[in-house]
Amino acid sequence: MIILKSPQELKKMRKSCQIVAKVIQELKDYIKEGLTTKQIEQFVENLIIKMGGIPAFKGYRGYPASACISINEQVVHGIPSEKVFIKEGDIVSVDVGVLCESFYGDGAYTYPVGRISEEAERLLRVTEEALYKGISEAVQGKRVGDISYAIQMHVESNGFSVVRAFVGHGIGRSLHEEPPVPNFGSKGVGPILKKGMTLAIEPMVNVGTHEVEILSDGWTAVTKDGSLSAHFEHTIVITEGEPEILTKI
Ligand code: CO
């Protein structure tokens, strides 16, 4: 069942999503070569709590940290570690979830560290563009498949591939609600978008094969061919006009 949110519920979702937005913004200045992924996660956790939120990922299905931090060929769900140091040329995906007043917000961004390769730069640009192409299809009366199709088209026409193993999702009083929002698929299929639907749209894009593997920690997803991967995510709400991006400052 897809749960539509009332204006009062959306007010609460805006709060949790604005905490996500602020964290993602602050990380742009914070992430630097020499930091460990654990330090980045600590920074995220402190900021969420300072702003009155609860880190949503910690303890979720046993996930051990307040943010997912995935470097280079890591796709999603990287576990922060005090042994992993960020270095110049890395791309660092940070996924942030917040619970506030019973509603969740979810967002992700991939940060370049210092000078990165031209290919990495293009990967980040195309993945973020794909997210916005998907968002622009998130209009009342269209279907989930229209979002999926727009994302996949943009990614593949640029020679990259879309991860199939993880998808976007409805979000609200639960972190994951109906409907699934794949980053691949066909126009005109899937549930009809209605005003008040709240969706986390989150393309994960690989330079090489779309296939992923899970490391022995049980969480970290990496590309099967070791190629780079990027991840951008926003929580949005369907309106009568343009979607409102709840996780945008
Ligand atoms: Co998500």
Image (cartoon, grey):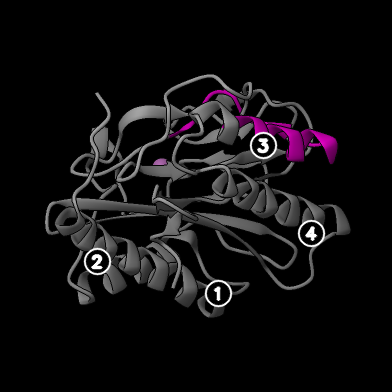
Residue plotted at (45% across, 66% down): 248
Per the model, the C-alpha gap separating discs 2 and 4 is 32 Å
Per the model, the C-alpha gap separating discs 4 and 3 is 21 Å
Disc 4 secondary structure class: helix
What amino acid type is highlighted by mark number 4?
A: Glu
Out of 153 and 114, give the one closest to the viewer: 153
Residue plotted at (22% across, 76% down): 50
Mark 1 or mark 3, which has the lower sequence index?
A: 1
Q: Mark 4 points at which residue?
A: 121
Q: Closer to us: mark 1 or mark 2? A: 2
What amino acid type is highlighted by mark number 1?
A: Lys
- Classify the position of ligand 1 by quadrant: top left, top right, bottom left or bottom right: top left
The magenta stretch is 148-168
Quarter where residue 178 is shown: top left
Badge 2 crowding class, 10 Å Cα cut-off, few under 14, some 14 to 19, many 20 or more, is many
Mark 1 or mark 4, which has the lower sequence index?
A: 1
Q: Closer to us: mark 4 or mark 3? A: 3
Q: Mark 2 points at which residue?
A: 15
